[in-house]
Image (cartoon, rainbow, N blue to C red):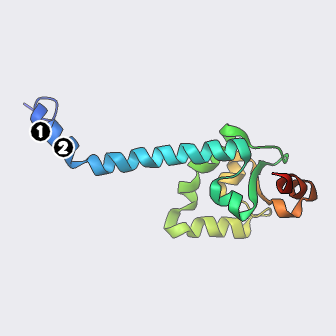
Amino acid sequence: MWSGPINDPEGFWETVVAMWPIIVAMGWAIVAALAFTIFEGRSGATPGKWLAKIRVLGTNLQPCGFGRALVRNLLKCVDGFFNFIVGIMVVALSENWQRVGDMAARTVVVDVRSDPANQARERTL
């Protein structure tokens, strides 16, 4: 008969205690991914993008929203293959300098310093 964690409660809790760093790290990664998705969906910028004065917009140049931001962020794993070589190659070879996540989510990253209306709005904030 199979004797696994279900039949051995003490062994189950020993496994959970041994794996707690992995569980905490996965939880933190999920929270961070959701936070970045919410930031990008609402304002078009994460804190780093805000400092760099760039924004993520839909291809219609409207805010991308939660759904597009989620698709964009979920596909970061595809761009990350082979130490981000895939992402670098796709950006370099695409017409609008988009990565895989941007193409799938129909988003673009824009420099807000090049938009005079946006510059005036940011000065007033």
Which amino acid type corresponds to the residue marked 2 in the rendered image? Thr
Q: Residue at x 63, y 42 (%)?
A: 38
Q: Position of residue 93 (x, y in %)?
A: 72, 68
Q: Residue at x 87, y 54 (%)?
A: 118
Residue 115 — which label? none
Along the viewing direction, whichever of 125 and 61 lies nearer the viewer: 125
Depth order, front residue of 67/51 = 51
Callout 2: 10 Å neighbours few (<14), some, many (20+)?
few
- Badge 2 is on which residue? 15
Q: Position of residue 100 (x, y in %)?
A: 65, 56
The amino acid pointed to by label 1 is Gly
In the image, is residue 81 above or below residue 67?
A: below
| Picture quadrant where residue 119 is located | bottom right
Q: Is residue 80 left or right of residue 49?
A: left
Q: Position of residue 73 (x, y in %)?
A: 60, 49
On screen, residue 79 versus residue 90, left or right, reads: left
| Residue receiving disc 1 | 11
Q: Are marks 2 and 1 in contact (CB under 8 Å)?
A: yes
Residue 3 visible in this rendered orientation of the protein: no
